[in-house]
Amino acid sequence: MMTRAAWTPCFAASMLVGLLLLAGEIEIPRLIDAPTEGTHAPSASESCSPGARGLDAPQSAPLVGVWSRYELGSVGDPVRFYYFHGNGQGLYRYGRQGLTNTHSFDYEVDGDTLALRFRKTGQRHQTQLVVQRDARGRRWLQLADDPREPGARYRERAPGATFDGPSRELAVCETAIVDADAAASPVAGRIWIDHRNFATGGAEFHMYQFNAAGIDGRGIGWYHQGDFDDWTTEAFTYQLGAKSLHLWFLEHDERERTSLTRGEDEQGRPTLTLHEDPRDFWHRRRFVDAGASFGLAAFADVLRSTGQHPAPASH
């Protein structure tokens, strides 16, 4: 019987990988040179070796990695892939380049049988799996009773597509105003999260993840919203001013601007307040600093399974 696996720090790192998968795959229009320093996430061998993650199910090893139905594309192109972490936990992501939804699941492999249990809904599926290699040496996965895309075939992606941070060039937001001081802003290169436990049960997070900014304060980032079982991811480019943030959400070609302030909460944690948060109906929302944008250790603290989730920023 399949049981829900504990959230370990290394699995938290795998969830970060899940969040970053979009970053290395999206092609951004209107390109300029991008800084690359500090944008590389540790590889699987560096951060999640078999010993570190307690991998004791070698029968699942052939599935470990990303299996994608579609090739890399541009903004608006379809996204469908399974990501099997290797410790019985994984992700299914679907949508379009620039705007996706992610479902987490537990899985077990027994011979050529794959059992899946989606964490949010508890839905269970059992299917026969076939992994084949084509004439070019590429591996393909097909599930006889695919719970998400009946009849689909998925090609194995190279490890670099899974674990590398974005090295793409950055987009220019035409409405942005250049501020040379913005490159030194502590907002860029960080994850900012507002996590709340609901009195009615469950929880939700709102998260802005900013890649490092260039000298003019421009960069690329991702907005995540959901809980740690299901969440959406939306790509954007941004430009930071001293007291403002310009955002260009790529899939909807939506340009937004909000004033911002930085400060500290009652616990001394750095905070970022967006006074007209475009993803909260232009309402004020305060976020706390959850660490470096591509720092696995910091993200593990956000997603750790023991102890409390991050305390929400008080409003």
Image: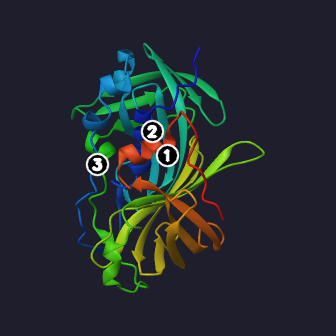
Q: Nearer the viewer, mark 3 or mark 2?
A: 2
What's the residue type where badge 1 is placed? Val
Mark 3 to mark 2 CA distance (whole Å)? 16 Å
- The N terminus, quarter of image: top right
The residue where tag 3 is placed is: 164
Tell me the SS state at disc 1: helix
State the residue at coordinates (50%, 34%): 151
Q: Which residue is mark 2?
A: 12
Closer to the chain start, of discs 2 and 1, is: 2
Residue 163 vs residue 30, the one in the foreground: 163
Q: Are marks 3 and 2 in contact (CB under 8 Å)?
A: no
Structural crowding at the residue carrying mark 3, measured as other residues with C-alpha within 10 Å and reported as few (<14), some (14–19) or many (≥20): many
Seen from the viewer's position, the closer of residues 95 and 206 is 206
Q: Which residue is mark 1?
A: 302
Q: Classify residue 11 by image quadrant.
A: top left
Q: Which image quadrant for residue 182?
A: bottom left
